[in-house]
Amino acid sequence: MFIMLTDMDMLMLNLKLVVLLFLYARKNQVSENIFPWKARIMGDPDSPYAGGEFLVDIHFPLNYPFVPPKVAFETKIFHPNIDITGDIYLGILEQWNWCPAVTLTEVLRSICTLLTNPDPAYFFVPKIAEMYNTDRSKYEKTARSWTLMYAMG
């Protein structure tokens, strides 16, 4: 079951990234599980991710909002704060930095901002981070190549 939150579109326009949220409940064999959600993040037109559609898995633990949701990219992406498995290293998603008042909208805004502005305090992939710091054009070319390969299909 997919539900489109069009109000979210209006909020995300302010970020130069359009985020379309498709929330759904996955049915398991016994009952409906409302904890796993998906978001589709559209790449910023002025970035190497332009034209890409990146699927993000969001899982809310049973003790949410007292612990952060688990958020990971399902779509492969070349980024110094996102590893090959899709795990995101983002400060607000860390247990030590999480605040129960943080909303899903704020989490998604932070991810959108992270895509165009990698956070050097939380570089997760050293090789990509080094490329980002030392050869920005190669980084952008590689990110664009991955976007074309994995996020534009």
Image: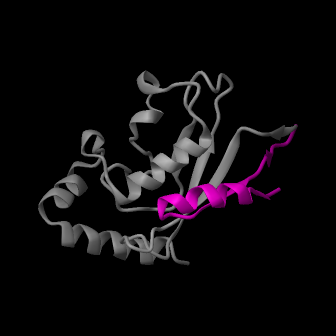
The residue that appears at 41% across and 62% down in the rendered structure is 77
Report x, y in % for residue 34: 77, 39
Is the C terminus in the top left, top right, bottom left or bottom right quadrant? bottom right
Q: Nearer the viewer, residue 119 or 89?
A: 119
Q: Quadrant of residue 6?
A: bottom right
Please state if 96 lies on the left or on the right of 31 as rendered.
left
As drawn, 53 above or below 81: below
Please state if 49 lies on the left or on the right of 17 as rendered.
left
Please state if 28 lies on the left or on the right of 78 as rendered.
right
Report x, y in % for residue 73: 50, 53
As drawn, 76 above or below 73: below
Is the N terminus in the top left, top right, bottom left or bottom right quadrant? bottom right
Q: Which residues are magenta?
A: 1-30
Q: Total label count?
A: 0
Report x, y in % for residue 103: 60, 37
Q: Quadrant of residue 9?
A: bottom right
The verdict on residue 19 being magenta is yes
Q: What's the colour scheme?
A: one colour
Report x, y in % for residue 36: 69, 43
The residue that appears at 14% across and 66% down in the rendered structure is 135
> Outermost residue toward the right?
30
The residue that appears at 16% across and 55% down in the rendered structure is 130
Residue 105 appears anywhere in the view? yes
> Outermost residue toward the left?
134
The verdict on residue 11 being magenta is yes
The residue that appears at 37% across and 70% down in the rendered structure is 47
Q: Quadrant of residue 61?
A: top right
Q: Nearer the viewer, residue 150 or 134?
A: 134
Residue 84 appears anywhere in the view? no
